[in-house]
Amino acid sequence: RTITTNTPANGTITVNPANTYLHERVYEHTIMNAGEPVIVTATPASGYKLKAITVTKADGTQVSVGADGYFLMPDSNVTINAEFVAK
């Protein structure tokens, strides 16, 4: 399964598989197996704060993401977005 990140305005997204030896990075995608833990780090630009991290499966349904950016990779490709707002 692949993880695609959309480049957010006013910040950055970093995706780190919790078990780094289990992944393979291919261009802007990260290849993961279903059930593997993933950690998303969203870093706001100066003067901004994180509003939300969303992980969306290929069928449009949302994946539950913990406050720490942790989620389990579903049996689907996903797209990760982060929204930042002014402080």
Image (tube, helix red, strand yellow):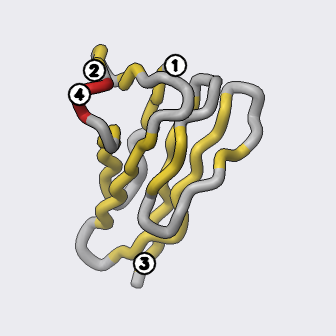
Which residue is the site of mark 3?
A: 86
Question: What secondary structure is marked by label 3?
Answer: strand
Of callouts 1 and 4, the N-terminal one: 1
The numbered mark, 3 or 2, whose residue comes first in the sequence reads 2
Q: Position of residue 47 (x, y in %)?
A: 30, 78
Judge whether 57 appears above or below 51 on screen.
Answer: above
Q: Earlier in the sequence, mark 3 or mark 1?
A: 1
Task: Judge left or right: residue 7 versus residue 33.
Answer: left
* Closer mark to the observer between disc 1 and disc 4: 4
The residues bearing labels 4 and 3 have C-alpha atoms spaced at a distance of 37 Å
- Nearest to the eye among marks 3 and 2: give it: 2
Mark nearer the viewer, 2 or 4: 4
Q: Which residue type carries mark 4? A: Tyr
Which residue is found at the position 43% from the left and 36% from the top? 5
- The image quadrant that residue 58 belongs to is top right
**Image location of residue 49, percent across then percent down:** 39, 75
Q: Which residue is mark 4?
A: 21
Residue kind at label 3, given as amino acid type: Ala
Q: Nearer the viewer, mark 3 or mark 1?
A: 1
Instruction: Measure the C-alpha gap from mark 3 to mark 2.
Output: 32 Å
Tell me which label, 2 or 1, sits earlier in the chain.
Answer: 1
Q: Earlier in the sequence, mark 4 or mark 3?
A: 4
Dot 2 falls on a residue whose secondary structure is: strand
Disc ID at residue 25: 2
SS for tag 1? loop
Q: Quadrant of residue 15?
A: top left
The residue where tag 1 is placed is 1
Query: Could you tell me which residue is drawn at 40 percent across and 54 percent down?
Result: 9
Residue found at x 42% / y 43%: 38
